[in-house]
Image (cartoon, coloured by chain):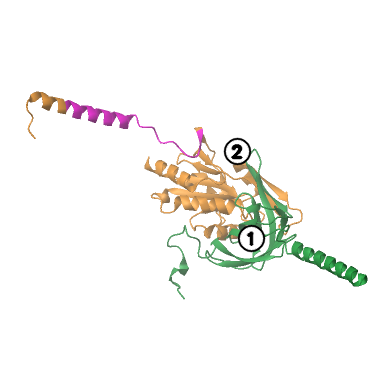
Chain colours: A orange, B green
Amino acid sequence: MRFKDGRHFLGALLILIGVVIVGVGCQAFAPAYEFKGSVIEPPLPLPDFELNDTNGHPFHLSDVNGDIALIYFGYTFCPDVCPLTLSDIKKALTDLEGRERIKVIFISVDPERDTPEILGRYLAAFDPGYIGLTDDFNKIEAVLKPFGAFAAKEEATDSAAEYLVSHTARVYLVTPEQELLMTYPFDFEADDLRSDLTHLLQQ
Amino acid sequence: MQRYTLVGVLGIALAAIAAQCAVARSGQDSGPNLRVERASARITTQNGVIYLTVVNDGGGNDKLISAETDVAEAAELHETTMDDKGVMRMDRAFDFEVPAGGSAVLEPGGKHIMLIGMKEDLSAGDKIDVTLNFEQSAPLTLKVEVEAGPTGHDDADHGHSEHAEDLD
């Protein structure tokens, strides 16, 4: 293609430069990623805690050691809420690149029934890598507080279940800096968690 | 002649009444007419849960009053609720209404059948025999498929199942 004269060439070049500037400008002003979880602003620094794991060894929040932690308070006798939440977490992590940098921690609010062995077996059925913590209830209560979580035993009248445990059912996302960044409500979309984790792992 | 006419009329009247009763009892117009949709189970090493929907296509109300299965020590109707602080609790229910032209929906975070004390190890794909009992209608027995179980894990679990090579 031959330009008749310099002016046409100059015009085309200006248009090309214009397109490049707009393109780059759009990139620079592109909306930042919006987290799907409920963001805690600013992230809340969490105190370290120590609770026994399913091998009976003390586990500390600081043992997460530079990984992202997904923390959930639940109990193994729970048929509906807890299995669904663990299943949603599992779905979010399946085939997720960088999942080795995420630690799933299930803290039992029913240490009476959830012995280390029972909790270990229960969690292994979801994923052998999930960490289970079970300890004296007063120690669990101390850990619930900074998360704004709650759990209480409820006598079950007219039931083969002697008692049940009422509890908040959020999933807490803790950064490698040991700060609470986000929470997900009961029955959250696995894709939302997956999307947020993907973004965080890329940082 | 008049006596036989009287007897004849009474006989027809009685037959008509009997026929009416028979029609009413068969439930075609005024009774409930139930079917189950969308049944699934989720099992852990401790307990399990069954979700399903009971649809009432009939003209009469009914109630699901209990469930029975051999795979657990007990099966009970329960309902999960959440308060305004996000605290979730479960309460035993003694019936779930299945109104005429309506349905009872048992789903995650809501009404469900709780299986207490699993007696068997179950895997995804296994079928559980469950009998549902109703206030008006005859019991319904169905096979409920396990979506996720402690052995063999579930569909989301790529490559972890030890049973993958055990093709009978």
Closer-to-camera residue (A4/B149) = A4
Q: Residues within 10 Å of mark 1 (few under 14, many from 20)?
A: few
**Image spot of residue B9 (x, y percent):** 86, 67
Residue at x-position 55% and y-position 50%: A85
Magenta span = A13-40
In this view of the protein, which residue sits in the foreground, B136 or B110?
Answer: B136
Chain containing the residue with disc 1: B
Quadrant in which residue B160 is drawn: bottom left
**Front position in the image: A59 or A44:** A44
Q: Quadrant of the C terminus of chain A?
A: top left
Q: Is residue B134 above or below residue A67?
A: below
Any magenta on residue B120?
A: no
Q: Position of residue A56 (x, y in %)?
A: 57, 56
**Within-10-Å neighbours for mark 2: few <14, some 14–19, many 20+:** few
Q: Are marks 2 and 1 on the same chain?
A: no
Outermost residue on the bottom side: it is: B168
